[in-house]
Amino acid sequence: MTGTLVLAGTPIGDVADAPPRLARELEGADIVAAEDTRRLRRLTQSLGVRPRGRVVSYFEGNEAARTAELADALESGSRVLLVTDAGMPSVSDPGYRLVAAAVERGAGVTAVPGPSAVLTALAVSGLPVDRFCFEGFLPRKGGERRARLREAADERRTLVYFESPRRLAETLREMAETFGGERPAAVCRELTKTYEEVRRGPLADLAGWAADGVRGEITVVVRGAADGDGEQVDRDELVRRVAVREEAGERRKEAIAAVAQQAGLPKREVFDAVVAAKNAGGG
């Protein structure tokens, strides 16, 4: 008889948010797989519980190898509890591989619902919540990050991102360039913690605010595209924006596409403006 994999949500800040069932699962599991065993120790101390089963680490560095071991345990009938540092496992955290392996082995998979930075940020953002999509972390490399943002520029659902505080200012600036500086957004920092802060406003304003540096765990919520988001930009400004992107290393074709998307214009119109400026300059 196969065992059961339990995905347990853990507090994203305030330990008092831990669901009561989490303590019972921690005490009763045969194996507790934790993204960080030190954080797990602090959590169990705060909850006043002691895991009776074996505690093992399960993080990005050993996820591939340990998945097979835990899948074997599930197949042998064990109850395996998976916890990550904060929030729900598998949501931008380790877990997906183990869930897939458990399903393949015929093991049961259930969850202890708990706090979620995605849903918490969405709820307090003040932006539409009826339809949304979670984009996780953007790529670290600038070119890949800008390409991902261009893909989302016309998305009408509210967008939710995780971001590092070190890259927040640059990401917000690129969002303003790609989505339009007036696009409403919210930066949610340190949710449920002592210094919780939700900063709302146009992307351009948020980029300026973040330029001085921001600390803590960050979730960014951006309103989806809406009719009329395209800017009214004169031809000279279109040419200037293309030139800025080319100077930054983008190919002209990519620069034209990005500027057109930001301004809500056909690529042909931006292309014609660039060609006209080149011809006027005698180049």
Image (spheres, grey):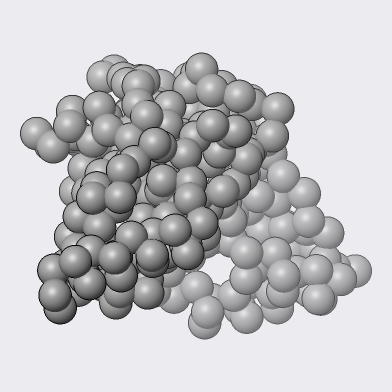
Q: Position of residue 48 (x, y in %)?
A: 47, 28
Q: Position of residue 252 (x, y in %)?
A: 30, 74
Q: Where is residue 266 in the image (x, y as percent from the top left)?
A: 51, 56
In the image, residue 107 sits, relative to residue 67, either above or below, namely above
Residue at 22 percent across and 72 percent down: it is: 279
Residue 23 seen in the figure: no
Residue at 56 percent across and 48 percent down: it is: 154
Residue at 38 percent across and 66 percent down: it is: 271
| Quadrant including the N terminus | bottom right
Question: Between residues 245 and 236, which one lies in front from this camera angle?
Answer: 236
Tally the marks: 0
Question: Between residues 141 and 251, which one lies in front from this camera angle?
Answer: 251
| Quadrant including the C terminus | bottom left
Residue 209 seen in the figure: yes
Residue at 27 percent across and 33 percent down: it is: 204
> Is 194 placed left or right of 28 in the picture?
left
In the image, residue 264 sits, relative to residue 182, either above or below, namely below
> Is 4 placed left or right of 197 in the picture?
right
Question: Between residues 19 and 166, which one lies in front from this camera angle?
Answer: 166
> Is 122 placed left or right of 81 in the picture?
left
Q: Which residue lies furthest to the left in this view?
A: 212
In the image, residue 3 sits, relative to residue 137, either above or below, namely below
Question: Between residues 50 and 261, which one lies in front from this camera angle?
Answer: 261
Classify residue 68 by image quadrant: bottom right
Classify residue 183 by image quadrant: top left
Q: Position of residue 35 (x, y in %)?
A: 44, 57
